[in-house]
Image (cartoon, coloured by chain):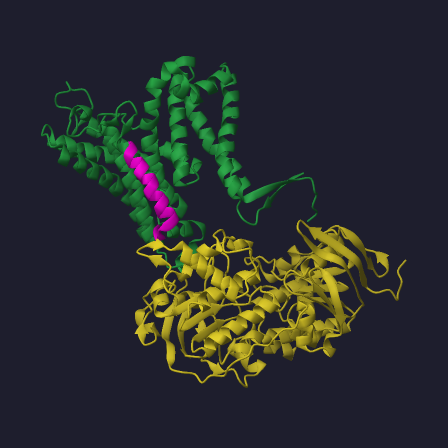
Amino acid sequence: MTQTDAPLLSVDGLTKAYPGVVANDHVSFEIQPGEVHALLGENGAGKSTLVKMIYGLVRPDAGGMRWQGDAYTPDSPHAARGTGVAMVFQHFSLFDALNVAENVALGMENPPPMAELSTQILRVSMDYGLPLDPERLVGELSAGERQRVEIIRCLLQDPKLLIMDEPTSVLTPQEVAILFDTLRQLSKEGMAILYISHKLEEIRTLCDNATILRLGKVVDRCNPREKTARELAEMMVGKLLHSPERAGATPGEIILNVTGLTQASPRPFGVGLKNVRLSVRAGEVLGIGGVAGNGQDELLDVLSGEIRTVPGTIQFKGQTVGHLGPNARRALGLLAAPEERLGHAAAPDMSLTENAALTGTIREGLSDRGFIRWGAAREFAERIIERFDVRTPGPDTAARALSGGNLQKFVIGREVLQRPDLLVVNQPTWGVDASAAADIRQALLDLAAQGAAVIVISQDLDELMEICDQFAALNEGRLTPPRPTKGLTVEEIGLMMGGAHDMEVAHAV
Amino acid sequence: MIRLERRPTPSRLWAAATPILAVVLTMIAGGILFAILGKDPLEAIRTIFWDPLFNEQFASYSRPQLLVKAGPLILIAIGLSLGFRAGVWNIGAEGQYIIGAICGAAVGLAFYPMEARWMIFPLMVIAGGLGGLLWAMIPAILRTRFNTNEILVSLLLVYVAEQLLASMALGALRNPEGGGFPGSRNLQQYPSAANVELISGTGMHWGVAAAFIAVIVAYVLLTRHTLGFQARLLGQSPRAARFAGVSPNRLVLICMAISGGLAGLAGLFEVTGPAGQISIDFNSGYGFTAIIVAFLGRLHPIGILLAGLLMALTYIGGELAQFMLGLPSAAIQLFQGMLLFFLLAVDVLSNFRIRIGRREVA
């Protein structure tokens, strides 16, 4: 029997354990029609496992769910969709070589004929301000447009509950605004939305209710609009967070000067750098924003020396360094920490001692006539572990056994302790828990306060606004001129990120 | 239900235990094979692994043979292991071994019959090592310059080297006093060029000494030296290696040079010692078997030392089994091949653990 006053979905005591970890421990919450409900938690808090159970991808060990009062036990996504649950995944499942309509058809249970489907797509996209041409190839679409394909595919199923997993991680601020307008409209029409994120401001603007998960358990429920972002963060992390403090030193002389840097990407689908120009002063933090895949990796490689380029385009402390390799640049004081921790910044199967020697041999004097001083390397590793509070049994542990946050602290600590004159970091807090992220940001600010120049490449705009003095954005390999962070509005940042193209249309509709 | 679960850290215990497990599994599978061939499996295994060392009748001949066979295997495998760790796949050690032998022998024969051992033998050693090194530079340079696959190029160059060997044995290096038979003069009988037994009755010759030295040097290189660290780094995470300032091309050249040079040396010591002369069928597959030795020894110098001795034992024991039990020689090669096969198969245990039971719905 369907009760009209029952919640749309009620989750009661769901428990799911994996070997060595309880992903969900008696999780309960309810969601009403038309409600935008946030699932908030750090990486590894159990958000993904929970929605996978709702979407029929994972079966719970214990507990149950009710859909409009009736028992709900989906054994496959197919069954979940049949009930009225739709999900937009963080990583898109689209085929680049097919057009929009074909991709939508592939994800549907009973796709109508193509011509009819195209009309439906056009209608839905107009209704919800998600302009999309059904004939375009997905390979030509931006990340925001690809997400629209996924959303429209869900909407065509006429769901009652829409699950969105970290939907804004690939979007520019303008695209986020459009997405939120759409979600609000859907919610007004009675659709429930389960919104998964760890971005607090988004949840505060969009959601009616929030369920906060920590280590698999529900630790709190609240109306996010009544809380500050800081309060939400502390609920999520379970302890008081300190905001990064900046000493506010006056910038010194120019440390790095890049002019007219054009460099093709060595990777097949990489984005080359086009006429990049930037400079950083001692004691200054330059933030480089932009959506992933716009040349961030290439910029880091060119600055670290992994990609060598025309000598004169990079001047470091007045010296021409464009042609130098990573170790020669390290010797001069130019250090870097790449985005990918495992396999780039650190060798996964090697111990922390070996990983300390990975970049530390030159500045820490870890080698003697070609022979590595393992004793000294071990001491260096121990120093990093102690100074940066890396949670690990010891320096003999393999890098891959560390959690993301701990390994990142190790990687950043390794470079910071080498007293760089310039440190370039790419995505320093990606996939890192909030308290480790705060530590890392503080370490970068401390480094700048000691007179080093810091370049932070990140997609986390909040992070950049928090710690950077100057902001520039990368878009398709082009870097905007840096502007002081102070007084920069979200709109201006969005324009710098180049996210404005064809977005105005959406509002006009 | 049996599942494999990735270990957070590779198991050191299993890394050491898998070669032993592989040997045991090979013995079992080999036993079954011998039983199908109509031989008593226990007797066959005993003939291969036990008799060469402990049977009074054979031991006096086979014990020295152990070092004679193990010497080149270890010397070549040590060179290969450095490259294998770096992800540089020199499969053509057999060719470098042949070219080393030809070059070294050619230098020696050029001086014949002059007697000046202090000069001629060292010159031959240098020529042998250089010959193998230069032969290995062909796939190395093709890879660094044109990004060709060194596996393919080095392997195919083995067949080129074999043709060269045949032409040398029939042409340029043929013994002028040999009555038209193919094959060079016997270098064993030319005191200035002979690779003599250093301690009589042990099989210990200069090549074996070189193998032991290589083991020690490789151990120091791998555990203490930057080059060994860089090789391991490049093999495990190429991107992290570049970040650490490793030049992949430089390392490819170095690894190929070392493996080629050592293979060349092994060839030189063989042609001046146990083989004695350049002949059409001079090479006997040491260069290929050394690949098994390198992996069986976990690419670790001490492991390679032990694996080389074990593999030498299967050679000698295999010959003995052919002679005593009439086992076909192919059965012995199959036996050696199985060893590598089982090793690679059980290798999974060092990175994964087996979980039995516990069903998982995912």
Asked whether, in this view, residue A299 is left or right of residue A434, the answer is left
Q: Is residue A24 visible?
A: yes
Q: Position of residue A426 (x, y in %)?
A: 49, 67
Chief secondary structure of the magenta span?
A: helix
Quadrant of the image occupied by residue B114: top left
- Look at the image and tell me in which quarter the N terminus of chain A lies: bottom right
- In this view, B132 is above or below A82: above
- Can residue A266 be spotted in the picture? no
Letter of the chain in yellow: A
Residue occupying the point 44% across, 73% down: A478
Nearest the eye: B206 or A159: B206
Please state the extent of the stretch shown in magenta in the rendering.
B208-227
The chain drawn in green is B
Q: Position of residue B16 (x, y in %)?
A: 49, 38
Q: Is residue A247 left or right of residue A134?
A: left
What count of labels does the image hold?
Answer: 0
Q: In this rendering, would A327 be left or right of B335? A: left
Point 68% across, 68% down: residue:
A238
Residue, far left:
B114
x, y percent for residue B199 = 26, 27
Q: Is residue A202 magenta?
A: no
